[in-house]
Image (cartoon, rainbow, N blue to C red):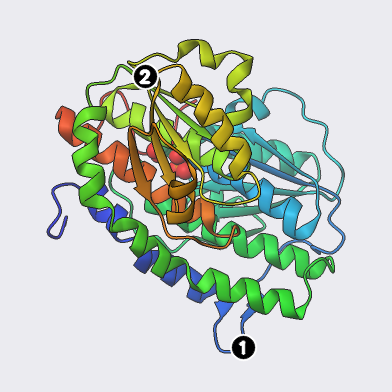
Amino acid sequence: DKGNHRHFMAKEIFEQPEVIGHTLSEYVNPLDDTIRNTDLPVDLASVPRITIVACGTAYYAGLVAKYWFERYARVSVEVDIASEFRYRDAALTEGGLAIFISQSGETADTLAALQYCRAQGQKILSVVNVTESSIARASDAILPTFAGPEIGVASTKAFTCQLTTLAVLAIRTGIARGAVDKTDEARLVRTLMEIPRHVAEALASDEHIQTLSADLAKARDVLYLGRGHNYPIALEGALKLKEISYIHAEGYAAGELKHGPIALIDEEVPVVVISPVDELFDKTISNMQEVIARGGRVVLISDKAGIARAGDGLWAEIEVPPVDPLIAPIVNAIPVQLLAYHTAVSKGTDVDQPRNLAKSVTVE
Ligand code: F6R
């Protein structure tokens, strides 16, 4: 049932405040601002290293999680694509924690990577949306995402629920390792509790994004740029656009621009820059100015202050609420989802069933 939406994808995008709220209520206690102690297969205080493996959008959730684990828990994290990881004889530390992220829980490469990790003495924790799945069954413990069934082939609400779950796990790891004290925990939990409200605010740009997408639909190539935790959101934005609108898109770390991709920039190439005001804002904006100077048409996703500071020459802007850096990647995922959705609708492609794609990839 699509409710009053044209596509499952739209319904699932707009469900996000609610399902993120469900996910949060499973993992945090709002009465005393603490993180709940769900069962885990490892002692987070002593885990030497974390390996995260997934495919596609779930892999991008893992990339964001790396920033969180490093920042809040000071633990070293490696993230890899399952189809690469499973064949490359990864050297793993005995007793390490391996985390698998999968909406369906049936992705063949992710499952094979899990079996490799088990054989290498890793503890297996999976973040899955389908709790009765092959990956869930093969794990020592699971952290379910409570996104509900995701029908649209392009993952949206599963992604933000994966992020929410991983943010909680990173903070919990920080607590176990003494990097997050009681005061920090309370502050971070209160910040997490604000995600649904801020996601709802980001969704309010829907009509504006729809208008802008009519132009984006004419592009042949689109670049997405971000730094830090917004770099994986740039990758996710590009994946979402290419898979449902069939427009070629690439995500880049903004600092990599001058190492090659800037050669692509001309008046024909829209560049989506994801950069709310944070400690990397000035760096990203200076990359953005280089794009504008070469005639690139910039769509800036930022908060009010960031848009005001960005200077002249923007082609379009999309406002997101100013939020704590902890939850920024979750909030910033919303405009890139809407941009892909409306661009695809504008082109008339089959949004919920894009060509050549399957919802769960059970063959390698
Ligand atoms: C993109 C998308 C895919 C999946 C990937 C992994 O929108 O949906 O990239 O994220 O196929 O699938 P799961 O999470 O089921 O393992």
Q: Check the image and report above or below for 206 versus 32.
A: above
**Residue at the image position 28 percent from the left and 44 percent from the top:** 152
**Residue at the image position 70 percent from the left and 67 percent from the top:** 172
Q: Nearer the viewer, mark 2 or mark 1?
A: 2
Q: Nearer the viewer, residue 199 or 283?
A: 283
User: Regarding ligand 1, which quadrant of the image does it lie in?
Assistant: top left
Question: Please, what secondary structure does the residue beneath circle 2 have?
Answer: loop
State which tag comes first along the sequence, 2 or 1.
Answer: 1
**Residue at the image position 26 percent from the left and 44 percent from the top:** 209
The N terminus, quarter of image: bottom left
Quadrant position of residue 176? bottom right
Q: Nearer the viewer, residue 120 or 25?
A: 25
User: What residue sits right under mark 1 in the picture?
Assistant: 32
Residue 313 as seen in the image, left or right of residue 122: left
Q: Position of residue 66 (x, y in %)?
A: 68, 46
Give the residue at the far top of this rendering. 263
Circle 2: residue type: Val
- Is the residue marked by circle 2 packed among few (<14), some (14-19), or many (20+) residues within 10 Å? many
Question: Please, what secondary structure does the residue beneath circle 1 have?
Answer: loop
Asked whether the viewer can see residue 106, the reply is no
State the CA–CA distance, disc 2 to disc 1. Answer: 49 Å
Quadrant position of residue 272? top left
Q: Position of residue 83 (x, y in %)?
A: 58, 27
- Is the residue marked by circle 1 packed among few (<14), some (14-19), or many (20+) residues within 10 Å? few
Q: Check the image and report above or below for 230 versus 3.
A: above
User: What residue sits right under mark 2 in the picture?
Assistant: 269
Q: Check the image and report above or below for 339 versus 200.
A: above
Give the residue at the far front of this rendering. 312
Residue 12 as seen in the image, left or right of residue 85: left
